[in-house]
Amino acid sequence: MPPGSHIILLSSSLCINSAVSPMYLSCNTSKGAIEQMNRVMAKDVARKGITVNTVGPGRTGTGLFYKSKNEQLLKMIAGQSPFNRFGEPEEIADAMAFL
């Protein structure tokens, strides 16, 4: 990769949450590995002028996220956000493009 390149990885906000249920074990294991990879890779490629960032979005309004959740549960989860809503995929894409 040429100097000035950017590597952007995708993680999860669940990696910093201490109240994660066991059903997220596989997901958090892989996302935790990505975050560690970011730390090590950033130190390695910085000397080449390459940056490494990881984006860890919160709950995002996708078809997979909405699947199997009733309206009451969705309202309760959205209420945990300071914006009282879910993020949109486009917002994550914009943040990644900025990096």
Image (tube, rainbow, N blue to C red):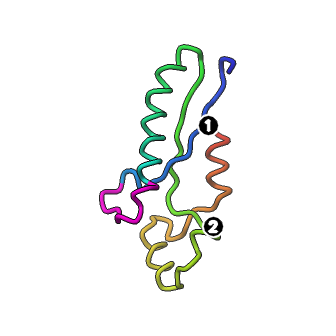
Q: Quadrant of the C terminus?
A: top right
Q: Which mark is residue 23?
A: none
Region rendered in magenta = 17-27
x 55%, y 79%: residue: 68
**In the image, residue 69 above or below residue 33:** below
Disc 2 secondary structure class: loop
The answer to the question of whether label 2 and label 1 lie on touching residues, with beta carbons closer than 8 A, is no
**In the image, residue 74 above or below residue 83:** below
Disc 1 secondary structure class: loop
x 68%, y 21%: residue: 1
Q: Which mark is residue 62?
A: 2
Q: Amino acid at mark 1?
A: Leu
Q: Position of residue 91 (x, y in %)?
A: 64, 55
Spatial CA distance of label 2 from label 1 is 22 Å
The residue positioned farthest toward the top in the image shown: 47
Left or right for 95, reference 33: right
Q: Position of residue 51 (x, y in %)?
A: 57, 27
Q: Quadrant of residue 7?
A: top right
Q: Which mark is residue 99?
A: 1
All told, the count of numbered labels is: 2
